[in-house]
Amino acid sequence: MDENMLCTKTHEYILEKDGVYEVGITDYAIDQLGDIVFVELPETEAEFAKGEVFATIESVKAASEIYMPISGKVVEINEEIANSPELLNDENYADKWLVKIDSKADQVELADLLDYSDYKEEVE
Amino acid sequence: MTKQTFLHDRHVELGARMVDFAGWDMPVQYSSILEEHKTVRENAGLFDVSHMGELIVHGKDALAFLNKIVPQNISKLTDTKAVYCQLPNKNGGLIDDLIIYKLEDNKYLIIANASRVDEDLNWMTRNQTGFDVEIENISHKYSLIAVQGPKACNLIRSNGEKDLPPFFSIKQGKLFNIDLWISRTGYTGEDGVELLVKNEFAVTLWDKLLEAGKACGVKPIGLGARDSLRLEAALHLYGNDLNENTTPIEAGLSWSVPKDKTEDYNGKQVIMEQIKNGVTKKLFGFRMLDKSIARHEYEVFSKGEKIGIVTSGGVSPTRGDNIGLAYINAPVLDKLTVGSTIQIMIREKLHDAEIVKLPFVEKHNKG
């Protein structure tokens, strides 16, 4: 996990890269979910407000809704993950972001997100 | 306060994720539900099912009493044989589903669901009047370990018990020099046994089975895989597929209900009427035609109308698709056959599914 990630208390993260944000779920969340068997991602161009459900991840046990950590518009979805959701459980696989979003999030929107180190402390 | 089985510390040491199940702190998975599922289908797995209830019914009227409370014909049960039973209320709705074993004349063992033991005892006590019978709850004295999978029986044979009881039978025996009851039953669709052992020997038995089974790939299995295994075998789960508003006929358990039992039993009128005239809802098996997953309580549609409800649903690791059980209402239920298309509402979208024949995965447990 990248130390620059900002996390939500509901276990999503954002990571700024090349002017867009990667959005995904934390390694802790993946571990808690167990075997992931299905991922439902939004269409590109879809717009979401902060806190809105943008994806669903199904493990063998249950379906979990994934919330957008900040507002933004989807510019890319991770097709690899959509086609092979079990890659999320693969410790050797790095590209676990779900979508990339274009966001104009200001400091107010970012304020309640946790630094990765603080997040880790929170969940451990 | 959640209850713990005598194997609780072992589960924690083995790295299990523990969850509350029917008031018990139980292992849902040790490594991965998918891997554990595969282990049972290919090798064998150990399950701690000590949360389940064990009751002894004994006394001069034990047979007459049991014949009054279940639709099955207990008179036909010979010593050491077991039968899958239901415990209906007066309306034919199910208080529980059970396995009843005849240990000897006037003495029967009942295995009940953990979540229903108290209800069962209440109901049995209410029905006890006029019968010379005692109902003893021995659940707190015994642990139950299931060993299931194609390699399960050989593991038992090579560790003390050469002659296993036939399918749906029980015998007293010894494993690793520990006295126990060996029953050729299970909840996975695989061949295997369930071992009823006094609590004080449970940990030793568990450790020795794991150790002896290591060479043939035996691993501990949590409740997660227990659920996916039983669903593939289309074995009902009380609370999901069965409850006080479902009869055995509606639940597709007609095969287990004798048509010629002369004794009166609770719910007989409704059950017999349904056998004769049909039902207003019935349990069907389906498979999803896309990658989506149906879950408990999702709604079922056909031609834009709600026609039923999913009671169990999930992944079938063996088949590689997603499957489920659903109650479908009349009149649609009469038109459905294998291959008919229905739709499941998943997150406000309809997904196509197809009626399939049960069980979803062929069983290998006829002994």
Image (cartoon, coloured by chain):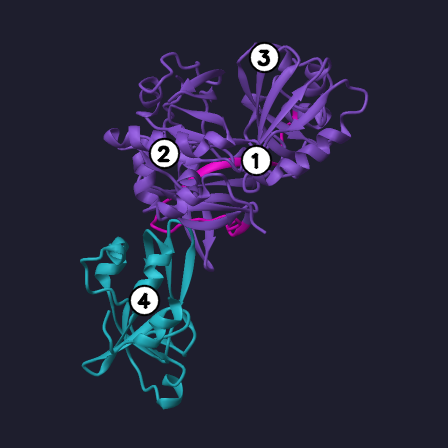
Q: Kindly identify which chain the residue marked by label 1 belongs to.
A: B
| Earlier sequence position, callout 2 versus callout 1 | 1
- Residue receiving disc 4: A26
Residue placed under numbered mark 1 in the picture: B113
Residue at 43 percent across and 53 percent down: it is: A62
Disc 2 vs disc 1: which is toward the camera?
A: 2
**Local crowd size for mark 2, using a 10 Å CA cut-off: few (<14), some (14–19), many (≥20):** few
Query: What color was chain A assigned in the picture?
Result: cyan
| Disc number placed over residue A80 in the picture, else none | none
Residue B337 in percent (x, y) is at 46, 32
Q: Secondary structure at mark 2?
A: helix
Q: CA distance from mark 3 to mark 1?
A: 21 Å
- Residue B3 as seen in the image, left or right of residue A40: right
Residue A108 in which image quadrant: bottom left
Q: Is residue A74 above or below residue B219?
A: below
- Disc 3 residue type? Leu
Identity of the amino acid at label 2? Answer: Asp
* Magenta segment includes B279: yes
Per the image, the residue denoted by label 2 is: B207
Residue B108's image quarter? top right
- The crowding category of the residue bearing disc 1, from other C-alpha atoms within 10 Å (few below 14, some 14 to 19, many at least 20), is many
**Amino acid type, callout 4:** Thr
Part of the protein shown in magenta: B277-305
